[in-house]
Image (cartoon, rainbow, N blue to C red):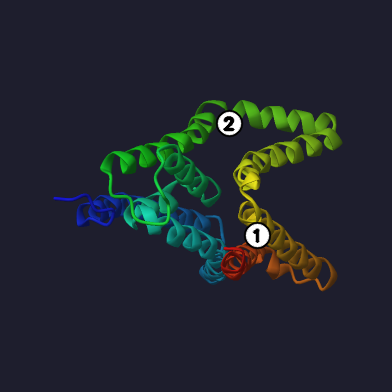
Amino acid sequence: MPFQVNHPMLFGLAALVILFVLFQSIFFLRKAWKHALELGLSSQKLREMSISTAVFTIAPAVAILIGLITLSKFLGLPLPWLRLSVLGALTYELPAATAAAEAMHTPINSAVTDPAVYNAIAWVMTLGILSGILLILFFQKKMAQGMHKMKTKDERWSAILMDSLFLGMISAFLGMIFKDLNHGLAGWIPVFVLLFSAMLMLICGLFVKIFKWRWLENYAMPISMLGAMAFAIPLTAWIG
């Protein structure tokens, strides 16, 4: 039987893990709800908080859905569905899968047909993200204490450190954008798309700052992503 990225068995395995995680979520939600009632919060207040929280999860979910659709083109639905539903992050899964596919000289514009390649990509996506879990499990308390101590001692340098860590993380992804600049104008397509996305994010930020549209803060990322993806279609068709 030829390998299929959307084999029913893969859907079944992914569904089992996701159902287990959903059961955990419901279990702890019920315990938290019960404890909140014991603390004196009313059921009406809890319902209002739940509805408000659910509404604000729509924006991140749109961004995750975009990543799912993108990855499903060459990895099928089960693996991206599992990764992005349980532990994975969009900012990691897509670059990790792309880098692994490129290392194995596998095109990402069609479904993977080699089970060895699929297995390697799955391991890269899974093992790479485990470092965060291990760091939190063994070092989160010490890191939190260190950050609190630094913030108490010098709040300015604490802010600089956090900004530097964030910029370092962003810099790690920029290599993928600028790596093909020597391939002519086509190699600049990711750069143009990046600049367009940044412009959309800047516009959203201006609306939040000038017009006080605080709700836009939660939708700025999906707007930037969708707008950049829409911009990439005619740009790629024009450049070729």
Residue under label 2, please give it: 140
In the picture as drawn, the residue positioned furthest to the left comes out as 1
Toward the viewer: 232 or 205? 232
Q: Secondary structure at mark 1?
A: helix
Q: Is residue 232 above or below residue 144?
A: below
Q: Which residue does the image show at 27% across and 57% down from the upper left?
A: 6
The picture places residue 14, in percent across and down from the top left corner, at: 30, 52
Disc 2 packing (10 Å; few <14; some 14–19; many ≥20): some
Q: Residue at x 59, y 71 (%)?
A: 234
Q: Does residue 114 sit above or below 212 in this rendering?
A: above
Indicate which disc residue 39 carries: none
On screen, 62 above or below 194?
A: below
Mark 1, other Cα within 10 Å: few <14 / some 14–19 / many ≥20: many
Q: Is residue 39 visible?
A: yes
Judged left or right of residue 114, residue 96 is right
Q: Nearer the viewer, mark 1 or mark 2?
A: 1
| Image quarter of the C terminus | bottom right
Indicate the position of residue 144 as horizontal and vertical percent values.
65, 32
Vertical relation: 230 (above or below) 221: below
For this rendering, which residue is in front, 54 or 36? 54
Residue denoted by label 1:
193
Residue 26 seen by the camera:
no
Percent position of residue 215, x then y: 69, 69
Mark 2 residue type: Gln
| Cα–Cα span, label 1 and label 2 | 36 Å
